[in-house]
Image (cartoon, rainbow, N blue to C red):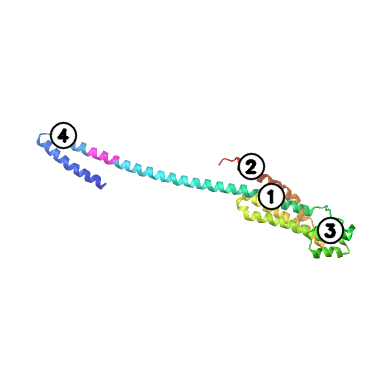
Amino acid sequence: MTELFAEILRLWEVLKTILAILSLIGVSIVALIGAAYAFFRYLGAKWIDQKFAKQLEAYKSEQTRELERLRHRINGVFDRTKRLHDREFELLPDIWAKLVDARDWAGGYMAVFQQYADIGRMNEADLDEFLSGTRFSEGQKRGIRDATDKQNTYIGILERYRYADAMDKLREANASLSKHGIFVLPAIRQDMKTLIDLIHSAVLEHQINQEHDVRPRMRESADKLKAEGEPLFKKIEEAVIERLWDSTTTTV
């Protein structure tokens, strides 16, 4: 702005000289005024053009910066979304597999019909060979050999191992869900947690029935697992399939 006014003053001095000369040679006052008006009109238009050009350039610069910020935000959201989907695609099958293992091991442990080796009919050599292939401790093996009722002693020890196995699978499923559940949709995560809790309650109930020979057998948790757990398992399965296949077909 200062430079523009300086230029105007310089040109005005030149114009005054020109006007003085024109006046001396007989140019009329009207013509002089017209010339002065045209001069200032030219300067005003030039100033407006410069001002507009400067503001337009500033506007373009601001819009360019805003577009760059927007592009950066969009790229950031896209990158986070892709990373989240990648982690979900990687972890969801593992969580699902552990949930299936927990369900299957618990189902095997709680099955009504069980088959056991008939160790009561084994001679000492056969019994030693059979027990050597089990996970039982040496003390437990001695307890079976020395027991009056070898069959029930064997079944009691075996059932404790099967209970421990079922609980281990449940703990693995629960730990995996707790650790990686942030990458699972909240609705699916909650359904998985509910199913784990249902299975856990039923396993505990069965263990108490077995350990303490409860009569009549407690069935509340087992019945609830059957009524609510099986439909919930199918619901989770369908949701997992949908998420995994959606990850391969959705255009981001």
Residue under label 2 = 245
Q: Position of residue 110 (x, y in %)?
A: 78, 54
**Relative horizontal placement of residue 172, taking residue 60 as reference (left or right):** right
87, 223: nearer the viewer: 87
Helix, strand or loop status at disc 2: helix
The local crowd at label 3, few if under 14, some if 14 to 19, many if 20 or more residues have their Cα within 10 Å, is few
Residue under label 3 = 129
- Residue 31 has which mark? 4
Magenta-tinted stretch: 40-49
Please report contact status of discs 3 and 2: CB closer than 8 Å, yes or no. no
**Where the C terminus falls, by quadrant?**
top right
- Residue type at mark 2 is Trp
Would residue 121 be counted in the magenta stretch?
no
Image quadrant assignment for residue 219: bottom right
Q: CA gap, disc 3 to disc 2? A: 50 Å
Q: Position of residue 72 (x, y in %)?
A: 47, 47
**Relative horizontal placement of residue 135, taking residue 235 as reference (left or right):** right
Q: CA gap, disc 4 to disc 3? A: 131 Å
Please report contact status of discs 2 and 1: CB closer than 8 Å, yes or no. no
- Residue 97 has which mark? 1
Image quadrant assignment for residue 208: bottom right
